[in-house]
Image (cartoon, grey):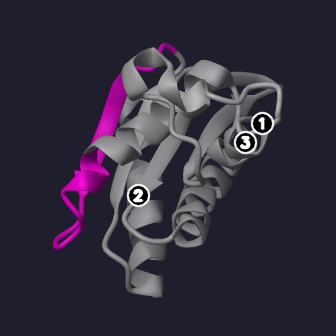
């Protein structure tokens, strides 16, 4: 598998939604392919409206930088090598957890972005989708 198809993206969204329901936090869930094209998106009932863009931008950040957004946060802190990174790409780079790249044989083929809870909650939901991807 080297591309993120709609079928795969739907499976990842479903898995993420199940995890979000388990922790009782409504989320927005985005799945992008390796070219940062949105393949699937879902906003759960009562998820924050702001989370629509944030979830998509987390996926964009992860696929375009080939890093999870937690790592992006670490390297973009004051005094770090990429301080100010969050101000690039017309503000699309997100510097807090919830975006994780999807990899096949060490190559980034897409990303998942999740928003709606705390950064820790977003990471747990995105991680569930990544684990599902890795088991395909």
Label 2 neighbour load within 10 Å: few <14, some 14-19, many 20+: many
Instruction: Give the label on residue 77, or none.
Output: 3
**In the rendered image, which quarter contains the C terminus?**
top right
Residue, far front: 79
- The residue lying toward the viewer, choosing from 121 and 72, is 72
The answer to whether marks 2 and 3 mark residues whose Cβ atoms lie closer than 8 Å is no
In this rendering, position of residue 123 left or right of residue 10: right
Q: Is residue 40 magenta?
A: yes
Q: Is residue 54 magenta?
A: no
Residue shown at the point (60%, 54%) measured from the top left: 97
Residue 96 seen: yes
- Measured as percent of width and height from the top left, residue 133 is found at 61, 46
Residue 44 figure quarter = bottom left
The answer to whether marks 3 and 1 mark residues whose Cβ atoms lie closer than 8 Å is yes
Magenta segment boundaries in residue numbering = 35-52
- Measured as percent of width and height from the top left, residue 23 is found at 47, 85
Residue 61 figure quarter = top right
**In the rendered image, which quarter contains the N terminus?**
top right
Instruction: Give the label on residue 75, or none.
Output: 1
The mark that comes first in sequence, 1 or 2, is 1
């Amino acid at each position: 598998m080297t591309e993120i198809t709609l079928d795969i993206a739907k499976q990842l969204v479903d898995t993420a939604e199940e995890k979000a329901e388990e922790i009782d936090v409504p989320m927005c869930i985005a799945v992008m392919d390796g070219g940062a094209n949105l393949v699937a998106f879902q906003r759960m009932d009562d998820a924050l409206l702001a989370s629509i863009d944030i979830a998509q931008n987390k996926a964009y950040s992860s696929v375009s930088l080939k890093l999870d957004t937690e790592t992006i946060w670490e390297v973009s802190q004051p005094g770090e090598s990429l301080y100010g990174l969050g101000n690039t790409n017309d503000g699309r780079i997100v510097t807090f957890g919830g975006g994780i790249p999807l990899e096949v044989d060490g190559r980034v083929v897409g990303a998942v972005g999740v928003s709606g809870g705390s950064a820790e909650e977003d990471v747990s939901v995105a991680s569930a989708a990544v684990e599902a991807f890795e088991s395909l």
